Amino acid sequence: MFSLMANCCNCLKRWRQPARKVTLVMVGLDNAGKTATVRGIQGENPEDVAPTVGFSKVDLKQGKFEVTIFDLGGGKRIRGIWKNYYSESFGVVFVVDSSDVKRIQETRDTMAEVLQHPRIAGKPVLVLANKQDRDGALAEADIIENLSLEKLVNENKCLCQIEPCSAVLGYGKKTDKSIRNGLNWLLNNIAKDYEAISERVQKDTAEQKAQEEQEKKERQERVRKIREERDRQEKEEAEREGRTLQEEGPDNPAMPSPFQPIGNVINEQNEEKFKEEKKRQREGGPEGGAGNISEEEQEEEEEDSERQTPESRAAPPDQTKKKTRKLRLKRKHRVDPLTDQTALESPPPPPPPPPVGWATPKMSRLPKLEPLGDTRRSEFFGKPLPPVANRLQLPNSDTHDVIS
């Protein structure tokens, strides 16, 4: 009875506990299937996945855990950024392409480098032997032997579980059971030692931030020394040549920024062009004097002047949106259609006649046609054929139509 009450109390405490936040890193060689695995867990279609450039972050809810998975790219040039995510990770998911036997040695070296890192050693590791659906894929025992998994795990004191799976067989609720079992195993082992791992993550994160700040200060110090050395060399050269250097003064905080929005610059240019055009028209430039301005143009100028109120003129260009001049169709731009009278007055000239003999065959070149048949028999040549006599023909008889 007492044990039953204790179990009920423990279940109630677990139910009331808030969701724990866990961060996982998913690593492995390129084309191992890391992104497809994450998308399958997330409930998306894992097929037609592009290679990951850099990293991608995925947030999902798994039971009582709020899981954040960092899917890190597996290319050789990008593996150097993996160490920046080790400090905040509670566990590691290492994805292996079990069908790529040629790169199994490279996979072993990469896994050894990950597990031997001081910020990963001692944390639980899940190994997913992906692509088991392909021909020639290594079995679980072969992968353990080729990767020397037992030796690496024992040396770095990491809890490890290997799961043969295939990420493309399903997604969401139909995800491969091996992937779900492996993820549950990883989260359960993190939950058993959550407090200790959480303290270690906080400590490693603080140390990494302090290290990054120290590196930043060192870079600034190196840049400062390089600038001082450059200024000293320039000063010595100026003294040898007998010229003076102009000292650069401090930056003036009241100086306006030279970078402005492109919309303001375009509006200012349009306003300047419009003012110059109005000034030219009033002074009687080549486009026409003040007396040649039509009534429609005057009305447009009056409308533009009415639109520009004193408040809009006084407001800065960043707060008010300046209006440009609206183009309208004027009478001088119109083209009148041709009337019948104008068409009759100026008819189009007729096309010139073709040259003589052009496109006309010469009949003398054709051979002389001769009548068909034999013309020596005058009794048949040139006379019509005699009529055909239709006689009654009985069935199954040998009689035929004859010429009478």
Image: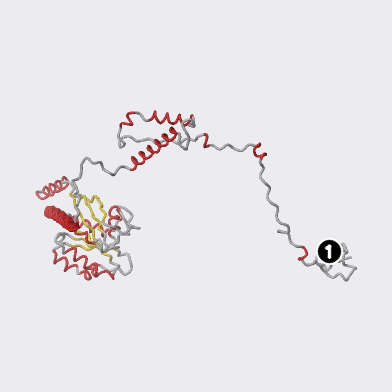
Q: What kind of residue is marked 1?
A: Gln
Q: Which residue is mark 1?
A: 393
Front residue of this view, candidates 32 and 113: 113
Give the residue furthest to the left: 2
Where residue 264 appears, as percent x and y from the top left, is 33, 40
Direction from residue 312 to residue 69 in the image, left or right: left
Q: Residue 156 appears in which quarter of the rendering?
A: bottom left
**Display colour scheme:** secondary structure
Residue 364 vertical position relative to residue 245 in the rendered view, above or below: below
Where residue 185 appears, as percent x and y from the top left, is 20, 58
Which residue is found at the position 35% from the left and 58% from the top?
48
Q: Residues within 10 Å of mark 1 (few under 14, many from 20)?
A: few
Front residue of this view, candidates 20 and 296: 296
Q: Residue 186 appears in which quarter of the rendering?
A: bottom left
| Residue 384 visible in this rendered orientation of the protein | yes
Where residue 154 appears, as percent x and y from the top left, is 14, 66
Give the residue furthest to the front: 242
Q: Quadrant of the C terminus?
A: bottom right
Front residue of this view, candidates 286 and 93: 286
Direction from residue 403 to residue 345 in the image, left or right: left
Q: Residue 335 appears in which quarter of the rendering?
A: top right
Which residue is found at the position 33% from the left and 58% from the top?
50
Direction from residue 394 to residue 108 in the image, left or right: left
